[in-house]
Image (tube, grey):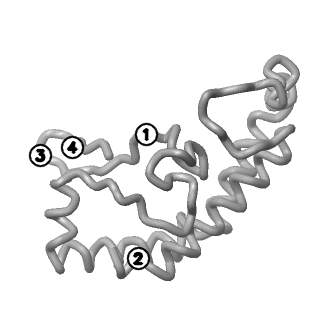
């Protein structure tokens, strides 16, 4: 997490390490499994989650967001909108950078084209949000 605030404003938490999301980087602390909480927590997060009032607000806020901007339908609509904006650039990207030829030292989930990657990400998001809905109060 990255924490920031404007002078006189509220504290904001921003997700960090986005290279470890959506099921990627499966060899590092279970990041790839959408049905597990990530076990690593900085000490300050553990302290904050030890507060019943803070924990209750986290659960409440998750439920608020899931009813609107973080519903699966809203998330997938944003993905669809981004893909419409990118349009032909997606195809050009994969002509230049053939996904089937990309190799890394980390075993990413296997895909051979953009449609498979898109489906894998959407599947992971649906599994993750469903897990979080069912287990958010266990944090």
Residue 39 drawn at (x, y percent): 36, 59
Measuring 58% from the left and 70% from the top, which residue is drawn there?
71
The residue at 82%/24% (across/down) is 101
Rounded to the nearest angstrom, the CA distance separating label 1 from label 2 is: 21 Å
The alpha-carbon separation of the residues under discs 4 and 2 comes to 25 Å
Mark nearer the N terminus (1 vs 3):
3
The mark found on residue 5 in the picture is 4
Assign the C terminus to one quadrant of the image.
bottom left
> Label 3: few (<14), some or many (≥20) within 10 Å?
few
The relative height of residue 78 versus residue 71 in the rendered view (above or below) is above
Q: Residues within 10 Å of mark 2 (few under 14, many from 20)?
A: some
Rendered view: 56 above or below 44: below
Q: Nearer the viewer, mark 1 or mark 3?
A: 1
Q: Residues within 10 Å of mark 1 (few under 14, many from 20)?
A: few
Q: CA distance from mark 4 to mark 3?
A: 8 Å
The answer to whether the residues at label 1 and label 4 have Cβ atoms under 8 Å apart is no
Separation of disc 2 and disc 3 at Cα?
A: 30 Å
Seen at 79% across and 21% down, the residue is 97
What residue does disc 2 label? 136
Left or right: residue 13 compared with residue 69: left
Q: Mark 1 to mark 4: distance in Å?
A: 19 Å
Give the residue at mark 1.
17
- Secondary structure of the residue carrying numbered label 2: helix
Q: Secondary structure at mark 1?
A: loop
Marks 1 and 3 close (CB-CB < 8 Å): no
């Amino acid at each position: 997490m990255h924490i920031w605030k404007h002078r006189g404003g509220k504290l904001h938490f921003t997700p960090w390490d986005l290279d470890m999301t959506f099921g990627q980087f499966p060899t590092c602390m279970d990041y790839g499994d959408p049905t597990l909480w990530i076990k690593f927590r900085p000490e300050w997060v553990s302290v904050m989650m030890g507060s019943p009032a803070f924990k209750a607000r986290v659960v409440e806020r998750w439920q608020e967001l899931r009813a609107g901007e973080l519903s699966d339908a809203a998330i997938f609509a944003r993905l669809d909108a981004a893909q419409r904006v990118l349009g032909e650039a997606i195809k050009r990207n994969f002509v230049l950078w053939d996904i089937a030829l990309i190799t890394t030292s980390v075993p990413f989930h296997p895909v051979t084209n953009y449609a498979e990657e898109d489906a894998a990400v959407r599947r992971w998001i649906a599994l993750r949000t469903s897990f979080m809905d069912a287990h958010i109060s266990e944090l």
